[in-house]
Amino acid sequence: MIHLDTNLLIALTDAADPHREAALGLMQGGIIAAVSSLAWWEFECGPVTSEGLLLVRRLLPGGIIPFEESHAREAARLFNAAGRARRLKFDSLIASTAILSGAELATANPEDFRPFVLHGLKLFAV
């Protein structure tokens, strides 16, 4: 399974986005794509059309993974272990969902998530 970061969800709705083909390619060959409910929230904040939401939702056979208490606990562990930098707070939430799902996190911004790799995140840079 692979979880998509918000930037790849956005790329799926924009034919001109340089990461679109890579995002589509991730979902071929039997890989199950999913997304954290937090990344989905960020995506829905837009700008995105209702058609874009439907299109991307259909491309996620793994669905939208709800954020639960165990994710909050893991996100706090990641945030603290990575040095408690304020800029890491939201990304620790997304990373925790991928870790607890046993998924790689695919992103076009790997530097945002690199601090969590030493603490269990499997990162797939696009």
Image (tube, grey):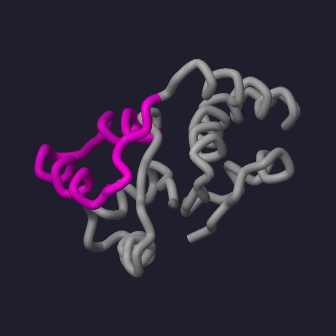
Does residue 82 lie above or below 58 as drawn?
A: above
Q: Residue at x 41, y 59 (%)?
A: 33
**Does 15 lie within the magenta span?**
no
Q: Which one is nearer the viewer's eye here, 53 or 34? A: 34
Does residue 70 lie above or below 22 as drawn?
A: above
Q: Position of residue 26 (x, y in %)?
A: 45, 73
Query: Could you tell whether 92 is left or right of 8 in the image?
Result: right
Q: Position of residue 55 (x, y in %)?
A: 18, 57
Q: Which one is nearer the viewer's eye here, 3 or 88? A: 3
Q: Residue at x 16, y 50 (%)?
A: 54
Q: Residue at x 84, y 37 (%)?
A: 82
Quadrant containing the C terminus is: bottom right
Q: Position of residue 67 (x, y in %)?
A: 49, 27
Query: Could you tell whether 71 is left or right of 117 in the image?
Result: left
Q: How many marks?
A: 0
Does residue 23 lie above or below 115 as drawn?
A: below
Q: Position of residue 5 (x, y in %)?
A: 50, 51
**Does 48 lie within the magenta span?**
yes
Q: Residue at x 42, y 52 (%)?
A: 34
Q: Which residues are magenta?
A: 39-66
State the residue lying farthest toward the left: 51
Where is residue 80, by image quadrant? top right
